[in-house]
Image (tube, grey):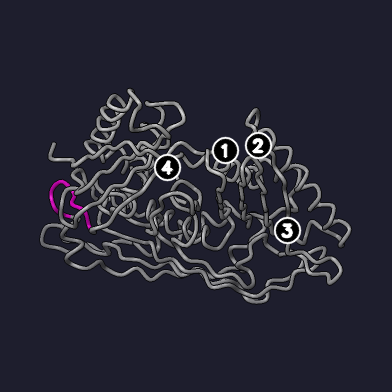
Amino acid sequence: MGKKNIYVAGVNEVPLPKRNIEIVERKGIGHPDSVADALAEEVSKALCKMYIKEFGHVLHHNTDETQIAAGQSAPRFGGGTIIDPSFILLVGRTTTHIAVGKEEKSLPCKPTALKAARKYLDKTFPNLDVDSEVVVDAKLGMGSDDLTGVYKASGHLANDTSFGVGYAPFSITDKLVLKTEEYINGNLKKKLPESGQDVKVMASRVGNKITLTVACAMVDRYIADMTEYRSAVEQLKSSVLDNALKIIGSQKVTVDLDVNTGDDYKRKVIYLTCTGMSQEMGDDGSVGRGNRCNGLITPNRPMSMEATSGKNPITHIGKIYNIMSKMIADDVAKSIGGDAEVRVRLLSQIGKPVSEPLNASIDIVTTNADSDPKLPKWKSEAEAIAADWLDNVDRVSESIINGKVRTF
C-alpha cells in the first residue's frame, strides 16, 4: 500500500532510565493549559460525531487554538467568592456549511462546541459553577480552501509537512509522575475533597533518588482555618507518598516528596482557591503548552512541539503522527522486550497520503547495539509493526474519535 520509507537503526547509547539525570513533568487536568487541551479535544470529538451523524463521515475542522484568560477570585477559609469569571474562547476552523445537491446546508458547529465544552467542565470540576464562574464563547470560522481541499481528497492526504514523535517504554520516573497526578485527581478525592483538580507533578531523578514536587490547589469551602489547611496538605503528602511507594514496588529507587513548596505559613501565603483551579485568578491557559500526547512533558526525551488536542483526527499530522508514533513505540518495545529504549519519528509531506510518510525513523537504543545479535530480528519486527500501523491509519482515527487515546 505505497512506499512507507521506514528506517530502523540500532543506536549504541545508554537508554535514559540508566542515565544519571531525568526530569519529568505533568500538568494535571485542572491546570489551565490542560483545561484548554481538554476542551479543544472535546469540541473536536463532538464535531466529529455531529458530522458523522449528518453525513456519515468527518468533515474538515481544527479546534486547537482554545484560550483561557484568568479571572479574579477572593478565596477564604469556609468558602470565598469568584469576583470576575475566567473567560474561555473556543477557537478554530470548522466546516460550517456544505453543498447538498443544489442547496447549501448550514451546520450547528458553534452550539455543538459550546455544549461539549460546558458538559466537560460540569462533569470534571465539581467545585466550579459553570453557569456563573466561567464564561465560554466560540469563534469557529470556515477553513481555508487549500486545506479543505486536501481533506476532501481521496484517501486523506496530509494537511501539513510536519512530524510526530513517540518513545517507549516508560521509565519508573514517567510512571510515577503520571500515576501520581491520576491518583490525586482520582481515588484521593474520595477521602480528601480539599484537594483541587489543578495539580502539577514534577520529578527530578538523580541516580536512584527521585525528588517529587507536587503543587495542588486546595479548595477553601472544605477548610475552616490555617490548622485545617496544614492538616490537609500533610494528609495529601502522606497519601501521595504511600501511593508512590506502591507504584515503585521493587524498583531500586527512593522517593522524597514535597507538597506546595510555595506556601509560607508565617506570611499566610498559601495555595487556597475557590474552585480548585488556578484559572480563577492569575493563570491563563493555551492548547499545546502542556503535556504531550503521552500525558507527560519529558525534556530528556525526543518531543514534538506540536499541539495534539483539537486537531482533526483524519488528516492532521500534528495529531495522527504523534499518537501513532507512541503506538508504534509501545508495540515495538513490547515485541523486543529487554531494556532497549525505542524512539519513533514520523515525517509527512503536505498533500501526500497519511499512510506514506516521507520518513519513518525508528531507533532501538541499547548499550551494545553494534554487537547485539538480536538487532536484525528487532529491526524486522519494528519495520513490520510500523508498516501495519501506517496501513491502518483508520484505527488511529477511530480511537481518537471514540476517546480511547489520550491527547494531553
Asked if the residue under mark 3 is in contact with the one under mark 1, i.e. CB atoms within 8 Å, the reply is: no
User: Which class describes the residues within 10 Å of circle 2: few (<14), some (14-19), or many (20+)?
Assistant: some
Question: Where in the figure is residue 211, as x and y percent of width and height?
Answer: 67, 48
Q: Marks 4 and 2: which is nearer the front? A: 2
Rendered residue at 15%/52% (across/down): 352
Check disc 3 and give the amino acid type: Asn
Q: Marks 1 and 4: which is nearer the front? A: 1
Q: Marks 3 and 4: which is nearer the front? A: 3
Provide the secondary structure element on which disc 4 rests.
loop
Check disc 1 and give the amino acid type: Ile
- Disc 4 target residue: 405
Check disc 2 and give the amino acid type: Val
Numbered badge on residue 172:
1
In magenta, the rendered stretch is: 152-159
User: Which class describes the residues within 10 Å of circle 3: few (<14), some (14-19), or many (20+)?
Assistant: some
Q: In this view, does 205 lie above or below 137?
A: above
Spatial CA distance of label 2 from label 1 is 9 Å
Provide the secondary structure element on which disc 2 rests.
loop
Count how many numbered circles sit on residues in the image.
4
- Disc 2 target residue: 253
Asked if the residue under mark 1 is in contact with the one under mark 2, i.e. CB atoms within 8 Å, the reply is: yes
User: Which class describes the residues within 10 Å of circle 1: few (<14), some (14-19), or many (20+)?
Assistant: some
Sequence-first disc among 1 and 4: 1
Q: Is the magenta stretch mostly helix, strand or loop?
A: loop
- Disc 3 target residue: 260
Question: Where in the figure is residue 256, as x and y percent of width and height?
Answer: 72, 46
Spatial CA distance of label 3 from label 2 is 23 Å
